Image (cartoon, rainbow, N blue to C red):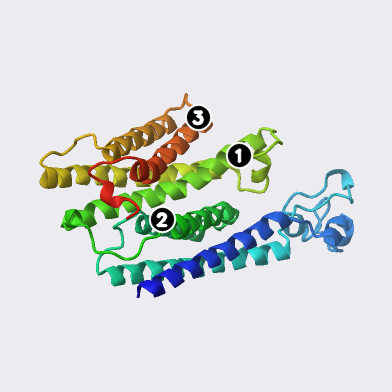
Amino acid sequence: MSALSDQLVTFAILAYLVAMICHAVEYALGNARTRAVAATPARELVGAGVGGSGGSPAGTDALVGGDAPAGGDTGAKLPARPNGRARLAGRVAVVATVVATLLHLAGLVTRGIAADRMPWGNMYEYVLTVSLIGVVGWLTVLWKRPSLRRLGLFLTLVMVLLLATAELVLYVPVVPLVPALNSYWFVIHVSTVVFASGLFLLGSVPAVTYLMRAGYERGKRSFPYTLAKRMPAAESLERLTFVLHAFAFPVFTFAVIAGAIWAEASWGRPWGWDPKETWSFISWVIYAGYLHARATPSVKRNVATWIAVLGFLTMLMNLFGVNIFFEGLHSYGGLD
């Protein structure tokens, strides 16, 4: 069962890679105009029926979206329509992401079956779970807001990098759960931390993309702002960033409180400034600062978004830096 889990995760990485490539194709093709239609004079598109004196030709609104060329400009172009190949690539990317997610889920479930426990006992399993929560959240967002599909390019890139790092650097064989984790609080605390971390991971993608897109909309044409040339509007990205963080923050708050209760039951004290506790507190303060800044009219949206990005960097520090470089009561969550 452990070998099957490893194979499923490998296939999931390949499927995410396929999805990323298809998203890149969609992004590269962009919104191409239908040249023959765009160059056709308006009088040929409209046809003959004219309704009443001074009335507009029948069918004009349907053909040009209500924006008929002023002054009889017969050379005006129609609004851009998505290129057919771009649409196809985007749809294939979504299908590949769904397949990758199912493989990802199956790999995590078989890992848990092989270990006879919840698969959250080390960094490898934690990264697998957090990334799965992130991609499931993304598919939910995509189902509600299909117009944000191109954001999938960056999301699948993150998935490939995270899972490849987990497989190549963090992987450890299946081992029994450390005795210190044998508690019902393990499920309560770790599940909420994982869920919140997955949403913070997902929220960091539109946050970074928003900063690039906002710069592009302000006229910046240098790297990395040009990467967001065909991304959704900055306002939509910023709103999605806020919604995801506003949803994740209360869950993260509960996870920190549950951890303190568990620490009191296990170690006789609720808080001891262990490295992981310290960095969890730092992350909590920064995310609280982001939500406060976002709700303050005098704070610019890009400033607030930078705070959210900083918060996710502290989450990465808590996951990788603390587990690898620091010793503490939470060291059992390390590589081995």
Asked whether disc 2 touches disc 3, contact meaning CB atoms under 8 Å apart, the reply is: no
> Which one is nearer the viewer's eye here, 132 or 45?
132
Q: Earlier in the sequence, mark 1 or mark 2?
A: 2
For the residue labelled by badge 3, is the local secondary structure a helix, a strand or a loop? helix
Q: CA distance from mark 2 to mark 3?
A: 34 Å
For the residue labelled by badge 2, is the local secondary structure a helix, a strand or a loop? helix
Mark 1 burial class by Cα count in 10 Å: few <14, some 14-19, many 20+: many
Tell me the residue that label 3 is attached to: 303
> Which one is nearer the viewer's eye here, 267 or 19?
267
- 67 lies above or below 93: above
Identify the residue shown where x is 45% and y is 60%: 167
Query: Callout 2, which amino acid?
Result: Leu
Tell me the residue that label 1 is attached to: 212
- 4 lies above or below 135: below
Estimate the x, y position of residue 256 in percent, counting from the top left.
Answer: 25, 43
Q: CA distance from mark 3 to mark 1?
A: 13 Å
Mark 2 burial class by Cα count in 10 Å: few <14, some 14-19, many 20+: some
Identify the residue shown where x is 24% and y is 64%: 176
Estimate the x, y position of residue 289 in percent, counting from the top left.
Answer: 38, 31
Query: Callout 1, which amino acid?
Result: Met
Q: Residue 327 occupies which quadrant of the picture?
A: top left
Q: Residue 222 occupies which quadrant of the picture?
A: top right
Q: CA distance from mark 1 to mark 2?
A: 31 Å
Estimate the x, y position of residue 211 in percent, counting from the top left.
Answer: 57, 37
Tell me the residue that label 2 is attached to: 170
Task: Give the label, 2 or 3, closer to the camera.
Answer: 2
Residue placed furthest toward the top = 298
> Which one is nearer the viewer's eye here, 274 or 85?
274
Residue 93 makes an appearance in the image:
yes
Q: Earlier in the sequence, mark 3 or mark 1?
A: 1
Asked whether disc 1 touches disc 2, contact meaning CB atoms under 8 Å apart, the reply is: no
In this image, 53 relative to 303: left or right?
A: right
